[in-house]
Image (spheres, rainbow, N blue to C red):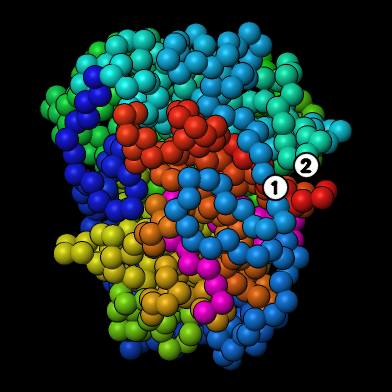
């Protein structure tokens, strides 16, 4: 029988999604209870009577940097005088209207097709999918559940290796009605879920119709919670990573809750382990106050887990294996070109709820990785390697460049606004200078075996990164998710999804980088590293979008006329087309429509002109966008998750009375 535990739910997401995706995180207090100085206090200090003229000079210099790139004068917020222009290349389509259809709705003049769906074959020997007779052995060869990130690696001849994350399982949706009891799951259900997590690698090519299709190939590979990973970097072998099954602290089975990711310049994929905390049970048995504090900072508490995996494998039981939880929350790297390769967990990139990891190459050739910690009031990070990048995608180049992620410096961001504190009142009203903007600095946390945080050893910085970042006074952000450098203009863009706790009693107030109290709709942050060098310790920033209903006063669209834009809520993933336009996928639309994919130019008179390209089906989230000059890919995650097996709300993508199945969709212009 179907039986769901009782829990509190709020917001636009389905209750089932909140429970199984993130352990119902929004119903609990945010794990960051530190009293480190947040922006409102920093601003008061910077803009004191003594400091105001000095601060103004610094901010003017930052504004000059942005203006030089945008081709505008520094004296006035030119964006406010913009008027609609001609669509820029890459955004010449008729916007899709907000809707609640159980379909992927695309613009007129475009076509679509499903590339691969949950249960389709990935490895040779995979049986035909039958949800009524699913087994763990079958799932281990089939496309996993709840696809998120999608990455393409050129394989030549109009062919690519496609890598897809499988973020989480929703057992109450996966099994036929009456066969799954959430309070008393069967071992087979747990083992199917273990096999449905992780990643899939398939080879794809252009189809005759114009989209992408899967090609059976030797590259087909499933990575699951039973796949062995190598732990590398400065925390490999740490006492905090050793378990009874792995006394070396260097081998881990599996990866889980893989959210977004990134394709590296050398042809591998980085994937972020995000809401891993929900899988571990019996944190309430811990009596050591230091250990309890560390667990709490990562949102790990209580007794039994939602999925009850601890009943079948003690590694999910903190009372039996207290260090197993520390072996998740990392950035992992997969080499799709070598199906026999061992995936890696990179400890030098820190441990937190990684949404993604994306790379820029610094002026001197060092590798820079940008990362967000997807939690209310958590932080933005970057890593700068010690060694230098070698061009190419050969096996040698892949090994060399991958090793760069094991030695370097890990930083966390602090943002400072350039407006008087009194002008940031939480309403979303623009300050007098016409933009939410300012400067920032990257605060070093650790490099190799050296810690820069008082009271923390280097291995403690890497394993308990959140607590180290608390100590140095990083800026508490509104759920920093995907962060990516723009390959055309060199600036960096971050999606901050939402934070309804912003400005609540006892919580951090609005600041210029997070300017709204009860931030339901999120915003897009844009920054330029000092001198355009990704390795720089300083940057200037501004908000490109303050999302929501354009008809309300608390929204901002880069200065573009608000009556000309599509409504957008809860930005999650970001991507770029070949022209440098920003594309945004959403998660948890608070405006009464299905989630979608949106384009927005970041330069010229069309800067801020948000246009909705597609919407996803009922109950679904838009993930993993890939934007090329020929096609668009989106991952449709958890369709119909607001229903139940006995009362389904979606039958996408197969229609009729079929079970809803997460899937990858390609969209292309008609008549290619």
Q: Residue 556 or 126: which is nearer the viewer?
A: 126
Q: Residue 382 or 505: which is nearer the viewer?
A: 505
Placement of 217 over or under 62, stated as above or below: above
Q: Which residues are magenta?
A: 563-587
Residue 572 on the magenta segment: yes
Q: Residue 284 or 567: which is nearer the viewer?
A: 567
Residue in the picture at 25% in, 59% down: 501
Q: Residue furthest right?
A: 157
- Viewport quadrant of the N terminus: top left
Q: Secondary structure at mark 2?
A: loop
Placement of 649 over or under 586, stated as above or below: above
Residue 404 on the magenta segment: no
Where residue 333 sits: x, y (%)?
58, 31
Q: Earlier in the sequence, mark 1 or mark 2?
A: 1
Where residue 235 sits: x, y (%)?
45, 29
Residue in the picture at 38% in, 67% down: 514
Residue placed under numbered mark 1 in the picture = 111
- Mark yes or no: residue 458 visible: no
Residue placed under numbered mark 2 in the picture = 210
Q: Are marks 1 and 2 in contact (CB under 8 Å)?
A: yes
Residue in the picture at 43% in, 38% down: 650
Where residue 23 sits: x, y (%)?
29, 37
């Amino acid at each position: 029988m179907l039986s769901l535990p009782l829990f509190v739910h709020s917001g636009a997401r389905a209750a089932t999604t909140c429970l199984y995706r993130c352990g119902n995180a929004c119903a609990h207090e945010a794990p960051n209870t530190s009293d480190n100085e947040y922006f409102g206090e920093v601003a008061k200090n910077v803009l004191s009577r003594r400091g105001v003229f000095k601060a103004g000079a610094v901010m003017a210099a930052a504004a000059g940097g942005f203006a030089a790139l945008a081709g505008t004068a520094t004296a006035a917020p030119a964006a406010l005088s913009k008027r609609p222009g001609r669509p820029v290349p890459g955004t010449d389509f008729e916007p899709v209207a907000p809707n609640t259809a159980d379909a992927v709705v695309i613009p007129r003049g475009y076509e679509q097709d499903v590339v691969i769906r949950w249960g389709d074959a990935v490895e040779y020997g995979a049986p035909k999918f039958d949800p009524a007779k699913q087994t763990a052995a079958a799932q281990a060869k089939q496309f996993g559940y709840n696809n998120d990130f999608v990455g393409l690696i050129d394989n030549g001849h109009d062919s690519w290796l496609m890598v897809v994350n499988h973020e989480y399982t929703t057992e109450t949706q996966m099994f036929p009605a009456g066969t799954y009891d959430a309070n008393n799951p069967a071992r087979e259900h747990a083992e199917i879920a273990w096999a449905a997590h992780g990643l899939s690698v398939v080879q794809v090519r252009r189809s005759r119709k114009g989209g992408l299709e899967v090609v059976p190939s030797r590259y087909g590979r499933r990575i699951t919670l039973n796949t062995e990973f190598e732990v590398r970097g400065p925390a490999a072998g740490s006492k905090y990573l050793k378990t009874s099954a792995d006394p070396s602290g260097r081998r881990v089975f599996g990866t889980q809750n893989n959210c977004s990711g990134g394709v590296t310049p050398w042809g591998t994929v980085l994937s972020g382990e995000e809401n891993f905390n929900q899988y571990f049970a019996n944190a309430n048995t811990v009596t050591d106050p230091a250990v309890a504090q560390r667990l709490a900072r990562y949102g790990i508490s209580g007794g039994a887990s939602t999925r009850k995996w601890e009943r079948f494998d003690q590694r999910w039981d903190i009372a039996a294996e207290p260090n197993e939880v520390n072996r998740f929350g990392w950035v992992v790297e997969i080499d799709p070109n070598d199906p026999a390769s061992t995936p890696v967990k990179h400890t030098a990139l820190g441990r937190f709820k990684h949404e993604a990891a994306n790379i820029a190459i610094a002026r001197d050739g060092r590798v820079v990785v940008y990362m967000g910690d997807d939690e209310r009031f958590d932080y933005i990070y970057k890593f700068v390697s010690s060694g230098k990048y070698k061009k190419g995608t050969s096996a040698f180049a892949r090994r060399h460049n991958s090793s760069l992620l094991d030695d370097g410096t890990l930083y966390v961001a602090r943002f400072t606004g350039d407006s008087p504190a009194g002008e940031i009142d939480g309403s979303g009203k623009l300050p007098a200078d016409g933009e939410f903007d300012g400067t920032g600095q990257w605060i070093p946390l650790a490099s190799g075996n050296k810690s820069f945080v008082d009271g923390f050893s280097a291995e403690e910085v890497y394993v308990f990164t959140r607590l180290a970042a608390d100590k140095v006074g990083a800026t508490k952000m509104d759920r920093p998710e995907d962060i990516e450098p723009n390959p055309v203009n060199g600036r960096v863009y971050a999606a901050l999804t939402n934070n309804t706790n912003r400005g609540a009693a006892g919580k951090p107030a609005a600041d210029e980088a997070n300017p709204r109290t009860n931030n339901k709709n999120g915003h897009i942050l844009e920054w330029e590293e000092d001198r355009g060098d990704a390795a720089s310790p300083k940057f200037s920033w501004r908000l490109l979008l303050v999302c929501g209903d354009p008809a309300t006063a608390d929204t901002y669209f880069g200065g573009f006329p608000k009556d000309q834009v599509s409504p957008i809520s809860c930005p999650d993933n970001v991507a770029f087309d070949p022209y440098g336009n920003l594309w945004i996928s959403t998660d948890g639309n608070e405006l009464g429509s299905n989630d979608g994919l949106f384009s927005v130019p970041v330069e010229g008179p069309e800067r801020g002109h948000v246009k909705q390209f597609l919407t996803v089906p009922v109950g679904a989230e838009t993930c993993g966008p890939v934007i090329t000059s020929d096609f668009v890919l989106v991952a449709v995650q958890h369709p119909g998750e607001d229903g139940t097996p006995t009362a389904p709300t979606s039958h996408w993508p197969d229609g009729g009375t079929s079970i809803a199945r997460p899937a990858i969709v390609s969209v292309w212009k008609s008549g290619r």
